[in-house]
Image (cartoon, rainbow, N blue to C red):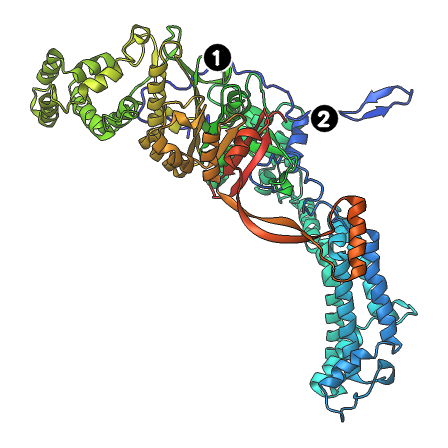
C-alpha cells in the first residue's frame, strides 16, 4: 500500500489519478447545521453561546439499528413503533388496576375470604391429611405447607401484576434509559425498598414481611423433613444470602451495576496509569476506539482537529477506514506517526481533494448512506418505515439497482445524481471507485468532482478510452469486444464473434506488441488482403507458428457464408468515424484511460458519450464499458467497492451482460441501470434482468406492461380481508313481523343482519394497475436487498421528501 492509501494499478498503461499542484481547502460546511443556543449577558444583551462543531454533532449523533433502506442518521422511531427508546402505550389506569385487584385479592386471602383456593387441593388429597377441610391460612399457623402455598400464591399475584400492567417496560423506560450514575442510584433505591419489604425487622419497620423468606424456609423443612437442618448457622446464613441476591439481581440488571463497576475500575486504572484504555462510553468525537487501542496521542490530535472545525465528514470517515486497516495489519505505530505529522490531512485522496465542490444530497459517510427521499406511510408500509428517510449505500448497491421510469420521472436528478455523488465521496475516503457513464444531455456532476473525465468525440478531452481495458490476454479482450459489437445481434453469436476477434487480436499483438487500433482491426475483419498479408509476413519468425495458424484459420473463413467478419466490421464502423479519429488509441495527444484502474484505485471516473447523430455508437460504447467493468472487477482488492452507473442503459442489456451482473455481487461490485421502459430490453431478458438485480425501482408513469413485470418479480403476500354480507331477517312471530314492517315503512329498507367473513387471501404486493395509476408524480416504488440477503418489501417513496 502506498502512503496515499492506494495500491498501484496492475496491467494498465493509464495515468488514472491526476495530482493537482496544491490540495484543495477543507470545506467547513456542516453535514447537519444546528442552531446554537443563545445566552443573556450581564448587561442584558443577547450573547451567542460557543458553537459546538457541526462535525462533532454529526459524529456523536446516534444511529440506531433500523430496517433496510432507512436513513439512520437522526432516525427517530415513528409513534406507535416498537422501540426501547419510547414508553409503551400504557395508561396510569392500566398500571394501577392490576395492583389494586392484587391487593384486594391478597387481603381476602389473608383473612380467609377466598375459600375456593383450598377446594382445589381438596380434590386431589386424601381426607385424612391434616390440611383437609381447612378454608383459610388463618387456621394453619405454624404449618409449613400452608406457608409454601402462601408464597406461591403471592408469586403468582406479583407475576400477574407485572405482566398485565406492563411494569417491565415501564421500569426499563424510567430507569434503563437514564445515564450513569443516576441509573445505578435509582436501581439501588428500588433494591433498598424491596429489601425493606422482605426483611422489615432489619430496617426497623413495623409492617409485615412479604411472603418470601418464610416460604423458602418452609420449603427447605418440607424437603429435608425437619427443623434439624437449621442447626447449622452456615446453612441459615447461606439461605439469607441467597434470598438477598435473588432480590438484588433484577435491580442490578436494570441499573447496570456490573458495567458501571467496570467503568469505575477503568477510570481508576486510567488515573493510576495514563496509558490504560479509557471508559468505553466516550462519544465518537473523542475517538474511543483509538484510545482503547492505546493511541491516545493520535486520538487527542484528532479530537482537537474535530473540535476546531478543521476536519469534515470525509476526513473522519477516511481516517476511521485507515485506522481499521492498520489495526488489522498491526501497523498502529505507522498510523500514529502519520496522524501526528499530518493531522486531519493524513491519507488524503491522491487527487488532493478532501470534499466535492458542492453537494446536492444529504450524505452520512459513516454508514455510507445517501438520502433519496422519504417512505410514505400507508397500508403496505411497516410501522418502522412510516415517515423515515429512504437511503441507499454500498450494502444495497452491491446487489445492483434497476431504475425504470419515463423521461422526467426523476431517475437522473433524484437517484442517479445523489448515488453518483455519494460514491464520489466514498472514493475520497478510499472505500470505493465509481464509473459514471452519461450522455451529453445528463449531468451527474461537475468536472472537478471527478479524477478522470473522458469525453468521447470531444477534441478537448484530456483522456481517451482504451477499448481493450489494458488487457494482456487476447481472448479476454476479444470477449468484451465481441459483447460490445455483437451482443445485441441475433444473427451473430457472441462465441463466434469472440473467436473471430481472437484470431486477429492475438497475431497482431504477437507481431506489433500491442492490440490494433480500431481502424486497423476493421480492415482485418473486412478481409482486406493487403492488411492480412502484411500481418502474415510480420509473423514469419519461428516463434510465431501458433499465431500464424490462428491467422490462417481466420483467412480461410474470410469471404465465406458463415463469416462473421463483415458484420463485426460494420458494427465497428460506428466507431471509425471522423469525430472519433483521435480516440480509441488512434491519437497521440490524448492519454488513454484503462478501466482496469478502478479495480485498484479509489477513482472517480466520468465517461461522456456522444448522443446527437451517434446514438448507436453510444449504445455500443455503453455495452463495451459494462463488459469491461464486469471483467476487470475480478481483480478487485478486498474491501474496495466498485460501482458502474449507467444513466441510460437502453440497448445495453444482453444475455451475457445479465450473467455478468449476477456475478458482481460476489466480486464486491455493482451496477446502477436506468431504463425508460423495460421494452428497451429484449423480451426474453425481462425476467432474467429483474431476477439478476437485488434492488428494483419503478417510477411514476410506468405503463401497465412494465408494471406487470415488477408485480411478477415482487410476488404476492398473505393479507387478511373482511367480507360483509347483508341478509334479510325473516321473523316468525306476528309482533316481530309487525315491527319489521313498520321499520321498513319508516326507513325504506328491509331489516337485515350483517354476516362478516374474515379470511386470508394471497394478494400481489403491487399490481400492474396500481403501479401504473396509483403512484403519484415525484414518487417511486422501491424494493431493496443487501449483500447479506436481507430484504425490504417494495415501498412507496416520496423522492421530493
Image height of 689 relative to 757, above or below = above
Foreground of the two, 3 or 122: 122
Asked whether, in this view, residue 42 is left or right of residue 801, the answer is right
In the image shown, does 796 or 420 lie closer to the viewer? 796
Q: Badge 1: how crowded within 10 Å, few (<14), some, or many (20+)?
A: few
In the image, residue 409 lies at what x, y percent? 53, 22
State the image quarter where residue 93 is shown: bottom right
Q: Give how far across and how far down residue 255 sits, in percent.
A: 74, 54
Relative vertical location of residue 654 with respect to residue 251 in this rendering, above or below:
above
Q: Nearer the viewer, residue 50 or 456?
A: 456
Query: Left or right: 197 with respect to 52?
Result: right
> Can you tell which quarter of the image residue 595 is in?
top left
Residue 21 image label: 1
Question: In the rendered structure, are the residues bearing label 1 and label 2 in contact, judged by CB atoms less than 8 Å apart?
Answer: no
Q: Which mark is residue 34?
A: 2
For disc 2, the neighbor class at 10 Å (few under 14, some 14 to 19, many from 20) is: few
Q: Residue at x 74, y 46 (%)?
A: 749
| Left or right: 724 as drawn, with respect to 408 | right
Per the image, label 2 sits on a secondary structure element best described as loop
Locate residue 157, reporting x and y percent.
78, 68
Say which of marks 1 and 2 sits in front.
2
Which residue is painted at 30% across and 5% down in the image? 578
Helix or strand or loop: what does disc 1 sit on? Answer: loop
Q: Is residue 462 left or right of residue 554?
A: right
Q: Which image quarter is the C terminus in?
A: top right
Figure label count: 2
Amino acid at each position: 500500500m502506498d502512503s496515499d492509501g492506494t495500491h498501484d494499478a496492475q496491467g494498465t498503461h493509464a495515468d488514472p489519478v491526476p495530482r493537482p499542484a496544491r490540495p484543495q481547502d477543507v470545506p467547513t460546511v456542516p453535514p447537519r447545521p444546528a442552531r446554537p443556543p443563545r445566552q443573556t449577558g450581564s448587561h442584558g444583551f443577547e450573547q451567542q453561546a460557543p458553537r459546538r462543531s457541526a462535525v462533532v454533532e454529526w459524529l456523536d449523533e446516534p444511529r440506531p439499528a433500523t430496517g433496510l433502506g432507512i436513513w439512520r442518521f437522526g432516525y427517530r422511531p415513528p409513534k406507535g413503533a416498537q422501540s426501547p427508546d419510547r414508553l409503551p402505550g400504557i395508561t396510569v389506569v392500566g398500571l394501577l388496576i392490576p395492583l389494586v385487584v392484587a391487593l384486594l385479592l391478597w387481603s381476602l386471602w389473608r383473612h380467609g375470604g377466598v375459600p375456593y383456593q383450598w377446594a382445589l387441593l381438596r380434590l386431589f388429597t386424601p381426607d385424612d391429611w391434616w390440611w383437609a377441610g381447612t378454608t383459610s391460612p388463618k387456621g394453619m399457623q405454624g404449618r409449613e405447607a400452608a406457608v409454601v402455598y402462601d408464597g406461591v400464591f403471592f408469586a403468582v399475584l406479583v407475576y400477574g401484576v407485572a405482566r398485565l400492567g406492563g411494569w417491565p417496560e415501564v421500569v426499563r423506560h424510567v430507569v434503563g434509559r437514564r445515564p450513569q450514575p443516576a441509573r445505578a442510584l435509582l436501581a439501588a433505591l428500588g433494591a433498598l425498598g424491596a429489601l425493606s419489604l422482605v426483611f422489615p425487622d432489619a430496617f426497623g419497620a413495623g409492617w409485615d414481611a412479604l411472603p418470601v423468606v418464610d416460604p423458602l424456609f418452609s420449603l427447605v423443612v418440607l424437603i429435608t423433613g425437619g427443623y434439624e437442618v437449621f442447626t447449622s448457622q452456615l446453612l441459615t446464613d447461606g439461605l439469607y444470602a441467597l434470598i438477598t441476591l435473588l432480590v438484588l439481581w433484577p435491580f442490578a440488571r436494570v441499573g447496570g451495576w456490573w458495567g458501571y463497576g467496570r467503568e469505575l475500575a477503568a477510570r481508576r486504572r486510567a488515573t493510576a496509569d495514563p496509558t490504560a484504555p479509557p471508559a468505553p462510553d466516550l462519544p465518537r468525537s473523542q475517538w474511543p476506539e483509538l484510545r482503547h487501542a492505546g493511541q491516545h496521542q493520535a486520538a487527542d490530535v484528532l479530537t482537537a482537529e474535530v473540535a476546531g472545525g478543521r476536519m469534515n465528514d470525509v476526513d473522519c470517515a477516511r481516517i476511521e477506514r485507515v485506522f481499521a486497516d492498520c489495526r488489522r495489519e498491526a501497523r498502529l505505530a505507522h498510523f500514529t506517526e502519520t496522524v501526528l505529522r499530518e493531522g486531519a490531512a493524513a491519507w488524503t485522496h491522491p487527487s488532493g481533494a478532501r470534499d466535492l465542490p458542492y453537494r446536492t444530497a444529504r450524505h452520512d459517510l459513516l454508514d455510507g448512506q445517501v438520502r433519496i427521499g422519504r417512505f410514505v406511510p400507508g397500508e403496505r408500509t411497516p410501522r418502522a418505515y412510516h415517515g423515515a428517510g429512504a437511503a441507499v449505500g454500498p450494502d444495497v448497491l452491491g446487489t445492483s439497482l434497476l431504475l425504470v421510469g419515463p423521461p422526467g420521472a426523476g431517475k437522473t436528478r433524484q437517484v442517479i445524481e445523489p448515488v453518483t455523488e455519494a460514491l464520489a465521496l466514498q472514493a475520497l475516503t478510499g472505500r470505493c471507485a465509481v464509473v459514471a457513464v452519461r450522455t451529453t444531455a445528463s449531468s451527474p456532476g461537475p468536472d472537478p468532482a471527478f479524477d478522470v473525465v473522458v469525453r468521447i468525440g470531444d477534441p478537448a478531452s484530456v483522456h481517451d478510452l482504451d477499448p481493450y481495458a489494458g488487457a494482456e490476454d487476447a481472448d479476454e479482450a476479444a470477449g468484451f469486444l465481441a459483447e460490445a459489437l455483437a451482443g445485441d445481434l441475433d444473427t451473430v453469436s457472441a462465441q463466434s464473434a469472440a473467436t473471430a476477434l481472437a484470431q486477429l487480436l492475438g497475431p497482431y499483438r504477437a507481431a506489433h506488441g500491442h492490440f490494433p487500433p480500431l481502424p486497423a482491426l476493421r480492415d482485418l475483419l473486412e478481409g482486406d488482403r493487403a492488411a492480412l498479408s502484411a500481418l502474415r509476413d510480420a509473423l514469419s519468425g519461428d516463434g510465431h507458428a501458433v499465431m500464424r495458424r490462428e491467422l490462417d484459420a481466420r483467412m480461410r473463413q474470410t469471404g465465406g457464408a458463415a463469416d462473421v467478419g463483415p458484420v463485426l466490421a460494420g458494427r465497428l464502423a460506428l466507431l471509425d468515424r471522423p469525430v472519433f479519429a483521435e480516440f480509441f488509441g488512434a491519437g497521440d495527444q490524448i492519454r488513454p484511460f484503462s478501466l482496469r484502474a478502478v479495480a485498484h484505485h479509489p477513482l472517480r471516473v466520468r465517461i461522456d458519450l456522444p448522443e446527437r447523430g451517434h446514438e448507436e455508437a453510444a449504445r455500443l460504447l455503453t455495452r463495451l464499458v459494462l463488459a469491461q467493468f464486469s471483467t476487470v472487477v475480478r481483480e478487485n482488492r478486498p474491501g474496495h467497492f466498485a460501482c458502474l452507473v449507467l444513466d441510460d442503459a437502453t440497448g445495453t442489456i444482453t444475455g451475457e451482460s445479465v450473467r455478468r451482473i449476477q456475478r458482481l455481487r460476489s466480486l464486491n461490485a455493482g451496477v446502477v441501470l436506468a431504463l425508460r421502459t423495460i421494452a428497451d430490453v429484449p423480451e426474453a431478458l425481462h425476467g432474467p434482468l429483474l431476477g439478476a438485480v437485488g434492488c428494483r425501482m419503478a417510477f411514476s408513469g410506468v405503463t401497465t406492461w412494465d408494471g406487470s413485470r415488477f408485480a411478477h418479480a415482487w410476488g404476492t403476500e398473505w393479507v387478511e380481508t373482511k367480507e360483509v354480507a347483508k341478509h334479510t331477517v325473516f321473523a316468525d312471530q306476528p309482533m316481530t313481523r309487525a315491527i319489521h314492517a313498520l321499520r321498513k315503512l319508516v326507513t325504506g329498507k328491509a331489516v337485515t343482519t350483517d354476516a362478516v367473513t374474515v379470511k386470508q387471501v394471497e394478494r400481489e404486493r403491487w399490481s400492474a394497475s396500481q403501479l401504473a395509476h396509483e403512484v403519484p408524480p415525484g414518487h417511486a416504488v422501491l424494493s431493496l436487498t443487501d449483500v447479506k440477503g436481507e430484504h425490504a418489501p417494495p415501498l412507496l417513496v416520496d423522492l421530493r421528501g
